[in-house]
Amino acid sequence: MHVLALQYAPKWHDKAGSHEIVEAMVAAANAPEGSLVVLPEMSDSGWTMDTEAATRGDSLGWAADCARRWRMSVQIGFARRVDRAPGHANATAIVHPDGRIGPIYEKMHPFGFTDEPRFYAAGAEIVLDRVGKFGIAPSICYDLRFPELHRLATAGGAEVLSIIANWPTARIEHWRALVIARAIENQAFVIAVNRVGSDPTHDYGGRSMLVSPLGEVLAEGGDESTALQAEFDHAQLSDYRVRFPALADRRSDLLDGERISRISDTATRV
């Protein structure tokens, strides 16, 4: 599978302007038909708490039109209205070359360090889509800090973890370390696409990455707009998981927390 990861600065609250950036980058990249194109979190509005601006227009419809014209799959980040408080969700989905929209993933961990949980509801479902031979589990930004999400996705069949973000420059080294860790511990390819530039509240660090199941960095961006490309080899992934069967040694029973021994207030002291 050929992957094209687009690192750019979305136009603030300007979806048409952001779409122009993406379409120009895809045209310049000259990626083959059948590629998977991955865009950052809230790909065409920027990461905004203005839910009216974030949900204005038809982001998914534009992505479906692009996917059909390019004959590629497109993972887009977008906001959508939902029927639970506070009424919106930060979401992502893969749109396929026939225009079909895959299962929509909603960010499970709105960023509590900010006001995001006041404006966007937490998602409740890990989703798995498929491009070619690969099972792909999407997630969004702050989700990267929660390894159990990605572990469960892998247990459910994920072979590629596709993480889209608006990750600030201030913590960009955390981004890099966690992306590589998610690849190694899950023996999965990782697509990690961050934006660059700034908005009214944050500066963003880029450093998008394409990483192999062994933790090898196949391509990495700096802090400027760039298009990263790499080939993901399904046979290589399958062979590695067989040769080094760490996933077979998982203790899924530990996830329930029942095996944690706690020191009580009356514990014997020595």
Image (cartoon, rainbow, N blue to C red):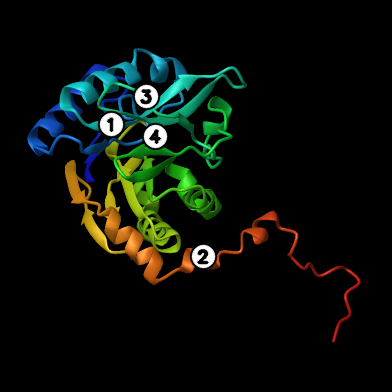
Task: Specify whether residue 212 is in view.
Answer: no
Location of the C terminus by quadrant is: bottom right
Q: Is residue 108 left or right of residue 245?
A: right
Earlier sequence position, callout 4 versus callout 1? 1
* Residue 74, position as x, y percentages in the image: 28, 31
Q: Which residue is mark 4?
A: 201
Q: Which mark is residue 101?
A: 3
Task: Give the Cα distance between marks 2 and 3.
Answer: 32 Å
Q: Residues within 10 Å of mark 3 (few under 14, many from 20)?
A: some
Would you say the residues marked 2 and 3 are in contact, meaning their CB atoms lie under 8 Å apart? no
Would you say the residues marked 1 and 3 are in contact, meaning their CB atoms lie under 8 Å apart? no
Nearest to the eye among marks 2 and 1: give it.
2
Earlier sequence position, callout 4 versus callout 2? 4
Earlier sequence position, callout 2 versus callout 1? 1
Would you say the residues marked 4 and 2 are in contact, meaning their CB atoms lie under 8 Å apart? no
* Residue 220, position as x, y percentages in the image: 22, 54
Q: Which mark is residue 74?
A: 1
Nearest to the eye among marks 4 and 1: give it.
1
Residue lying farthest to the bottom in this orientation: 270
**Residue for point 33% across, 19% down:** 59
Q: Which residue is mark 2?
A: 248
Helix, strand or loop status at disc 3 = loop
Would you say the residues marked 2 and 1 are in contact, meaning their CB atoms lie under 8 Å apart? no
Q: Is residue 187 left or right of residue 266?
A: left
Earlier sequence position, callout 2 versus callout 3? 3
Helix, strand or loop status at disc 1 = strand
Identify which amino acid the numbered label 3 is placed on: Ile
* Residue 263, position as x, y percentages in the image: 81, 70
Viewer-proximal residue, 190 or 21? 190
Identify which amino acid the numbered label 2 is placed on: Ala
